[in-house]
Image (cartoon, grey):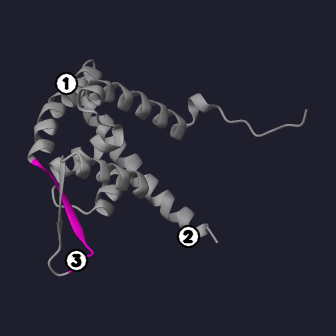
């Protein structure tokens, strides 16, 4: 059998982050998916617009690092269900901005405490120093990933 490159997944950061992200997202989703008929992507769109109203769908995709097509589908579902409102720019009718409707905020206001409660439970055994370090390291990883992504883009033909 020829020698192949080895990848120890338990020590490979992208894999570890992905698994952790999937598990935590799924755990939070259980709290709202059936109750509000929302998928993870739809909730993320609502969460961003609840905090930052009047963004375009592209801006939501950028803030969440989600696929534009997935965001577009989620926006369409949320508009259809009456949870989002769309307004068109007076100067450029091609540009639209999104915001939560009253029905959207009614759901948002119920899910946010659930999500924050889950976060408190998840971080419960960490002291303030560990939490500060965790978020500082996440910010640093985010910064380094953006740099690596930019360098990779420069290398692509």
Q: Which residue is mark 2?
A: 154
Within-10-Å neighbours for mark 2: few <14, some 14–19, many 20+: few
Q: Position of residue 27 (x, y in %)?
A: 35, 25
- Label 3 to label 2: alpha-carbon separation: 34 Å
Q: Is residue 76 visible?
A: yes
Circle on res. 117: 1
Position of the C terminus by quadrant:
bottom right
Of the two numbered discs 3 and 2 in the rendering, the one whose residue sits closer to the viewer: 3
Mark earlier in primary sequence (1, 3): 3
Q: Position of residue 109 (x, y in %)?
A: 11, 36
The reply, left or right, for residue 51 in relation to residue 17 is left
The reply, left or right, for residue 128 in relation to residue 138 is left
**Residue drawn where x is 42% and y is 56% of the image:** 69
Of the two numbered discs 1 and 3 in the rendering, the one whose residue sits closer to the viewer: 3
Secondary structure of the residue carrying tag 3 is loop
Magenta segment includes 93: yes
Write the start and end of the magenta stretch as one range: 92-101
Mark earlier in primary sequence (3, 2): 3
Secondary structure of the residue carrying tag 1 is helix
Circle on res. 93: 3
Magenta segment includes 98: yes
Q: Are marks 1 and 2 in contact (CB under 8 Å)?
A: no
Q: Is residue 126 visible?
A: no
On the image, which quarter does residue 90 sit in? bottom left
């Amino acid at each position: 059998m020829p020698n192949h490159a080895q990848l120890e997944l338990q020590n490979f950061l992208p894999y570890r982050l992905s698994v952790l992200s999937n598990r935590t997202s799924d755990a939070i989703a259980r709290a709202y998916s059936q109750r509000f008929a929302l998928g993870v992507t739809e909730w993320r769109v609502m969460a961003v617009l609840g905090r930052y109203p009047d963004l375009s769908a592209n801006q939501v995709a950028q803030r969440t690092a989600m696929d534009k097509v997935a965001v577009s589908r989620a926006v369409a579902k949320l508009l259809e269900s009456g949870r989002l409102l769309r307004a068109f720019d007076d100067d450029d009718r091609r540009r639209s901005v999104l915001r939560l409707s009253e029905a959207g905020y009614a759901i948002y206001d119920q899910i946010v405490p659930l999500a924050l409660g889950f976060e408190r439970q998840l971080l419960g055994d960490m002291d303030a120093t560990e939490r500060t370090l965790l978020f500082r390291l996440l910010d640093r990883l985010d910064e380094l990933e953006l740099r690596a992504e930019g360098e990779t883009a420069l290398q692509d033909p």
